[in-house]
Amino acid sequence: MPADRLASESIRATTLLPLLLALALTACGASKPELPGKIALLAPFEGQYREIGYNSLYAVRLAFSDAKPQNVQLLAVDDGGTPASAVARIKALNVDPAVAAVIALGPDATHPSAQMANDKPLILIGNWGHDRAAEESFYAANPDQTMARQSGDLHMLVQARALEDVPESISFISSGGLPDANFRERYLNSAMYAPAPNLLATLTYDVARLALSALEDGKTISATEYRGLNGPIRFEDGYWVDAPLNRYRYDGDQLVRATD
C-alpha cells in the first residue's frame, strides 16, 4: 500500500473516533468533558490536491514537535474533496468542544460555504481564489485582488502544473516563503515519508506555532503575534498585517524567486 494511502487511512481512523465521541456526548446531554485542547487541520489528503494536505500535515507536526505544547493535540481531517464535504467536516468539528482552532488549506476547505458553517477560529492558509467570508475567519495570505485572480498557491503545486500544463515561464504570487536549508532538513527528517516542503510548509508551520501560542497563553488569535520563518504574523480585522507578496516561477523542476 502506498505511503500516502497508509497515512490517509491513519488520518481517517484517528479523526473519526474523536468526532463520534463528541457527537455522542452532545446528544446524551453529558457535561462538558475535560479533554485536551485540539488544533484541527482541514485539508485535502486524497485526490488531485493531496499534495496540499501532506505538505501542511508534516509542517504542523514539526511545529508541535518544536513547540512541545502541554495538553494540546493535532486533529487532521480530510476535507472530502468538495465544498459540501468540507462543510460537513466543519460542522462535525463545531460539536467537538475541545477543538480550539481550525487551520484550513485548499480550494474546498477555504470555500466561503465552509467558512460560513464554522463557529471556531478558522485560519485560512494560502490563496485559493477565495477571500475571507466569515467573522471567525483569519486570512493568512495577502488579499490583493491580483493575487486572488491568479490563485498563485494552486499554480505552485507540482500536481496542478502536471494536470493544467502550466508553462514554465509563468510567474505567480504567494505569501509563503521558500524553505531554507535548515527547515528543509528538519522537515524531511521529521518523518520517514515526509514530502519535499513547498511554500505552504513554511507558512503552515508559522501559523501552527501562532495557534499553539494563543492556546497555551489563553489568548485569542487576533491578540497573538508570532515572528517566524515568514516574518511577523498578526491579524487585524481578520487579515494578516503587512502580509508579503512574493513572486515565484519554476526553473525546470526548481521553484525560484522571480525577478521580473
Image (cartoon, rainbow, N blue to C red):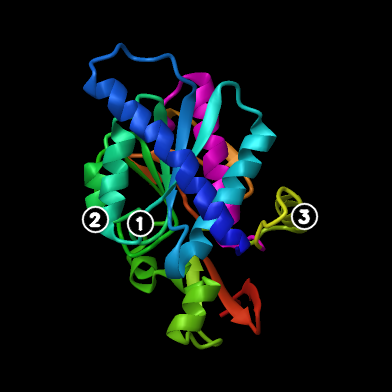
Q: Amino acid at mark 2?
A: Ala
Q: Secondary structure at mark 2?
A: helix
What residue sits right under mark 1 in the picture? 80
In three-dimensional space, the C-alpha distance between marks 3 and 2, rounded to whole angstroms, equals 37 Å
* Left or right, residue 2 beside residue 41: right
- Residue 111 placement (x, y as % from top left): 29, 56
Query: Sequence-wise, which precedes: disc 3 or disc 2?
Result: 2
Left or right of 92 on screen, residue 172: right
What residue is shown with label 2? 84
Contact flag, marks 3 and 2 (Cβ < 8 Å): no
- Observer-nearest of 67 and 25: 25
Query: Residue sitting at 22 percent across and 52 percent down?
Result: 113
24 on left or right of 258: left
Up/down of 82 relative to 134, above or below: below
Q: What is the C-alpha distance between the residues marked 1 and 2?
A: 8 Å
Secondary structure under the numbered disc 3 in the rendered image: helix
- Camera-nearest residue between 54 and 173: 54
Q: Is residue 33 visible?
A: yes
Position of residue 54 relative to residue 211, above or below, is below
